[in-house]
Amino acid sequence: MTRLMMPVALSVVLAFPAAAQDLRAPSEFESIADPSERSAAIFEEMGKVLTHPRCLNCHPKGDSPTQGDDMHPHMPPVVRGAADFGAPGMTCNTCHGPENYETVGVGGIESVPGHEPWSLAPVEMAWTDMSLGEICAQLKDPERNGDRTMDEIHDHMANDGLVGWGWDPGEGRTPAPGSQQLFGQLTRAWIDTGAACPG
Amino acid sequence: MTISFTVNGQDRSVDVDPDTPLLWVLRDELRLTGTKFGCGIAQCGACTVYLNGMTRRSCVTPISMVEGSDVTTIEGLSGPEAEAVQAAWTAIDVPQCGYCQSGQVMSATALLQQNGAPTDEDIDNAMAGNICRCATYVRIRQAIHDAAKTLEG
């Protein structure tokens, strides 16, 4: 096939890989004697994942996601929609399939990310522009965490497939630090030490 | 690898690499060339088809994902919304060069199938992923409104 390129200014921004971050294991916090201080410190470690672009891009406080390691506005422009799944006529699955797919075109997008399901986090679970302490409080609030118990929060962090996509984001994207297994262990340790929040 | 699915209501099977984009299969294997290649990265909307009734950019759809599914292309688009869109498009001569128009019509029809009386904002939200290098956006929006009015009865 002749690969015609439309002579239009496609606003495609190259993703800049963020510096790789390691994620420390819960055992590395055992030297902190005070359980509450240890818990808050563990949550700060979890924050390396929670505030990573792979998570924040789809936990926006507004009606549109961001994308890329530089968190630029999603292109094409898309909106949250009534079900956090886009607008009628252009829902998320118009482009996002059940798994990552390497593109055949040119223009700086090496792959279109995908997972089943694929959607924005509900607006009450927005994390952008929030401090770690605010995100921590939100995670513990059933009104803003999807009515989850703390065990269910752990299960979400440790086992949810879309959360796990953050460590397998496809070509052209920096994975979240560490692994989902380690993130789950940190979440468990945070809960078991009292689920304290950073100040 | 043999992949079986329906295209415009007809059973089809193709023997291609499972990573082959659906767009390649439609154009090169099945010779349905109404669906266009624009960018190959899901940024322009020229390759829009329906997969099980929902809009889908065929350039970023591996054929392995299509197994057992129903695909509708511009050649097979039908129904009252499609007819209203086609009539409205013709009435005010929406296309200029026309390259993007099959994708525009697929998205516009999908919008009207779900929302019979879209506002300007609804139209913008649904059509934002369909780029027109001739900038026929004003006529596209007008034609969608016109089509919606004819569907009202």
Image (spheres, helix red, strand yellow):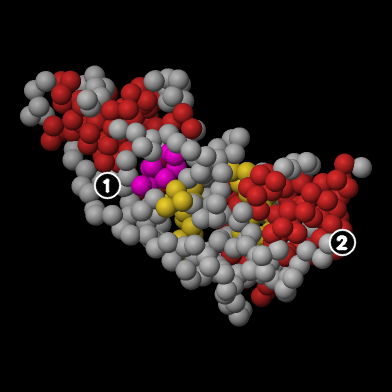
Q: Type of residue at label 2?
A: Ala
Left or right: residue A82 compared with residue A32: right
At x 34%, y 33%, the residue is A130
Left or right: residue B61 compared with residue A131: right
Q: Type of residue at label 1?
A: Pro
- Name the image quarter holding residue A170: bottom left
Numbered range of the magenta stretch = A53-60
- Residue B2: give x, y in percent of width and height: 62, 65
- Residue B83: give x, y in percent of width and height: 86, 55
Which chain does tag 1 point to? A
Q: Is residue A55 magenta?
A: yes
Q: Residue furthest front?
A: B138
C-alpha gap between disc 2 and disc 1? 56 Å
* Residue that badge 2 annotates: B91
- Residue A23: give x, y in percent of width and height: 21, 43
* Quadrant in which the N terminus of chain A is drawn: bottom right
Relative depth, front residue between A104 and A44:
A44
Q: Is residue B141 magenta?
A: no
Q: Residues within 10 Å of mark 2 (few under 14, many from 20)?
A: few
- Residue A78: give x, y in percent of width and height: 56, 48
Q: Is residue A54 visible?
A: yes
- Name the image quarter holding residue B133: bottom right
Which chain does tag 2 point to? B
